[in-house]
Image: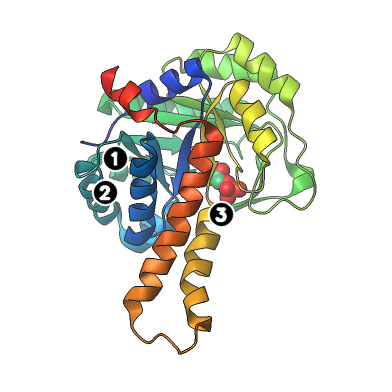
């Protein structure tokens, strides 16, 4: 199938209270593992890309890899740009057929964030692609951005409401609710009350950032409370490295590269399938194709 827009996928998922996994790809093999894992589970999926990864491979190469994988797949796949504050990178994705982008103005004061996010919103709406935008400060490390745990700020409910009123057609909204990117140092303190409040006043599906390290119960509760896009990056990157490197410890030594690539693929794919099961999106691809 051609790449799809993520807004209808996420609306359907939110209404039925399951989560669509959004995995950060690193290279072709990692994208192949995401697509094949989703196909095996008959699940809709989002492949997202960090700006650093675009700098390595280019918008065009990444776009062509994922479009080719999607063309041969029978599940809905959206190609999404993760945290980005550069409108030129956003335009580059759009020009190369990506179906979704994120503008991250969370480091700016509220008014400035609204102003810049609206510029990205106008660009995305004119091009017919989905937009994700962020409010508050999600802790941890993502791409080149680091927010110390004591500097993470939960999104303010009134600001969230005003932010979303300015951009009513957002595909997904990312308020900081206490999760963090990277490995958790202690027990994550998720502000469920705030999440539930936001879902009761805002129609737009919510993105859950910092998925790696959350428990099944935490995922389920967030999804039941309105999170429809669930981001996983650190876990997929760990599987990328471990799956490959584990082959190095085998006796007799493996000298051909392909067994390394295949082991890396299998490790990543198993992780993808596991998350799809946890988020409840297994078997949901047919429902979306029918919609
Ligand atoms: P993790 O790296 O914690 O899985 O978070 C991913 C994420 O939220 C990407 O935006």
- Reading the image, the residue beneath label 3 is 235
- For the C terminus, the image quarter is top left
Q: Is mark 1 within 8 Å of ligand 1?
A: no
- State the SS at label 3: helix
Q: Is mark 3 within 8 Å of ligand 1?
A: yes
Say which of marks 1 and 3 sits in front: 3
Q: Relative to 164, is 191 on the left or the right?
A: right
- State the SS at label 2: helix
Label 2 packing within 10 angstroms: few (<14), some (14-19), many (20+): many
Residue 135 locus on image (x, y percent): 60, 30
Residue 240 locus on image (x, y percent): 47, 63
- State the SS at label 1: loop
Looking at this view, name the residue that lies furthest to the front.
252
The quarter holding residue 199 reads: top right
Q: Is residue 12 above or below residue 148?
A: above
- Reading the image, the residue beneath label 1 is 98
Q: Please report whichever mark, 1 or 2, sits nearer to the chain's N-terminal start.
A: 2
Does the rendering let one see residue 266? yes
Residue 159 locus on image (x, y percent): 64, 19
Q: Relative to 187, is 5 on the left or the right?
A: left
Labels 1 and 2 touching (C-beta < 8 A): yes
Looking at this view, name the residue that lies furthest to the bottom.
252
Q: Is residue 228 above or below residue 27?
A: above
Q: Nearer the viewer, residue 74 or 63?
A: 74
What distance separates the C-alpha of mark 1 from that of mark 3? 24 Å
């Amino acid at each position: 199938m051609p790449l799809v827009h993520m807004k209808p996928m996420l609306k359907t998922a939110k209404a039925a209270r399951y989560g669509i996994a959004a995995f950060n790809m690193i290279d072709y093999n990692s994208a192949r593992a995401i697509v094949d894992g989703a196909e095996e589970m008959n699940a809709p999926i989002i492949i997202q890309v960090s700006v650093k990864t675009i700098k390595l491979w280019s918008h065009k190469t990444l776009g062509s890899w994922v479009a080719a994988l999607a063309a041969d797949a029978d599940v809905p796949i959206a190609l999404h740009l993760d945290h980005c504050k550069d409108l030129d990178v956003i335009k580059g994705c759009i020009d190369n057929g990506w179906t979704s982008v994120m503008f991250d103005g969370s480091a700016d004061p509220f008014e400035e964030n609204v102003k810049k996010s609206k510029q990205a919103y106008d660009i995305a709406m004119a091009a017919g692609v989905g937009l994700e935008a962020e409010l508050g400060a999600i802790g941890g490390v993502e791409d080149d951005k680091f927010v110390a745990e004591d500097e993470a700020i939960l999104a303010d409910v009134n600001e969230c409401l005003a932010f979303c009123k300015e951009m009513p057609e957002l595909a997904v909204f990312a308020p900081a609710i206490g999760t963090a990117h990277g490995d958790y140092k202690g027990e994550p303190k998720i502000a469920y009350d705030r999440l539930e409040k936001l879902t009761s006043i805002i129609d737009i599906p919510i993105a859950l950032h910092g998925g790696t390290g959350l428990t099944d119960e935490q995922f389920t509760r967030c999804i039941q409370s309105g999170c429809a896009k669930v981001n996983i990056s650190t876990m997929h990157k760990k599987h990328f490295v471990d799956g490959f490197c584990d082959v190095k410890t085998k006796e007799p030594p493996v000298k051909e590269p392909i067994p390394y690539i295949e082991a890396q693929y299998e490790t990543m794919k198993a992780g993808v399938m596991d998350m799809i099961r946890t988020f409840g999106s297994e078997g949901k691809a047919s429902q979306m194709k029918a919609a």
